[in-house]
Image (cartoon, grey):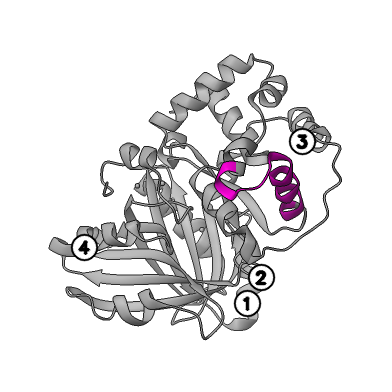
Amino acid sequence: MLDHLDRALIHALHIDGRAPFSHIAAALDVSPQTVSRRYRRLRTEASLRVVGLPDPHQAGQTQWLVRLTAAASSAQDLAHALVRRQDTSWVKLTSGGTEIVAIIHAPTEGGGSNSLLLRDIPRTNHITAVSAHCILHTYLGGSTNWRRSADTLDEEQQRVLREREAADTAYAPVPRQLTDGDADLLVALQKDGRATHAELAQATGWSPVTVARRLADLQAGGAIFFDVEVDTGHFGANTRALLWMSMSPAHIEDVAATLAGHDELAYVAATTGPTNLVAQALCRDPADLHRYLTRRLGSLDAIHTLETSPVLRNLKAASPIMTDAARTRRPSAPARSRM
């Protein structure tokens, strides 16, 4: 389990994933060396990782939530194959290890390549069932954090971090959208959202000043955001489940807004398919999940049907790109990385 300082550091990274350790230390009233040591330890022991991700709409990407059913003997190999791809994220083994759930990032334009959905999955042996759900709108997740991973800092500490972030540079950002020229920058940020301006300059061929200004412009325009990946088990969330719900279209907005306010949920999105709302629940244990399903969800009369898929293992998190360090931390994944 994480102690108070660990949780405070993670909360600080949610506020500003690229904040210098000196800024975080000032808000937490500890030394920069202490923050640096804690960060390195959490990377090793809790799979902590800051990643820079594009807004899917601005990047011209459509997200598909895909459910694959396979024989138990081949499901893990298929899941690991999905992990290795750079067009997938959030790869999970669910439902007794015979189902794989993953998000696939595909070009929105009809003429773009979509080999995984159209060619690779249909031709793969041992897959017995496939369902693909287009993610229409995300109500919780992405740039919005799971509340229980960002509930430690008081208002004054949060103000200090935000003010230091705003005062970090005299440059006034100009909101920009992503272009093809940002591809190298995005790849580098998906590997490590805390890469220095010098490291990003080496990856892009730009100067450090140009990198800093481009980052500021893209963030100001909402084109990119920084997510914090961390093993939620260290927050006491040892029982995870995907919840597939259906309701009439007239009730989707109200139900989704209600669910987005539940501390037990880390992800809520509207999708196509036989169910039209999906959520990820993070609970202490099966009894805690049962209480949530029967008491909180059970009180929402608009929900007609509910399917619960227990998540046995997370093999890949928010970033499509896995790093060597992340592969080492995740022994269940083949030799890679926050609904």
Residue with the most extreme bottom position = 110
Query: Residue, x 62% and y 36% (percent of image)?
Result: 198
Q: Which residue is drawn at 43% across and 51% down?
A: 317
Residue at the disc numbered 4: 75
For the residue labelled by badge 4, is the local secondary structure a helix, a strand or a loop? helix
- Per the rendered image, the range of residues in magenta is 202-219
- Which of the 4 image quadrants contains residue 11? top right
Q: Is residue 203 magenta?
A: yes
Judge the density around disc 1: few (<14), some (14-19), many (≥20) Cα neighbours within 10 Å: few
User: Is 213 colored magenta in this rendering?
Assistant: yes
Q: Which of marks 3 and 4 is nearer the N terminus?
A: 4
**Res 179 visible:** yes
Closer to the eye: label 3 or 2 = 3
* Residue 188 x, y percent position in the rendering: 53, 48
Task: Decide which of tag 4 and tag 2 comes sooner along the chain.
Answer: 4
Residue to which mark 2 is pinned = 254
What residue is disc 3 on? 165
The percent position of residue 121, horizontal first and vertical second, equals 30, 76
Q: Of the residues under marks 3 and 2, which one precedes in the sequence?
A: 3
Please provide percent x and percent y for residue 201. Answer: 62, 43
In the visual, does 229 lie left or right of 205? left
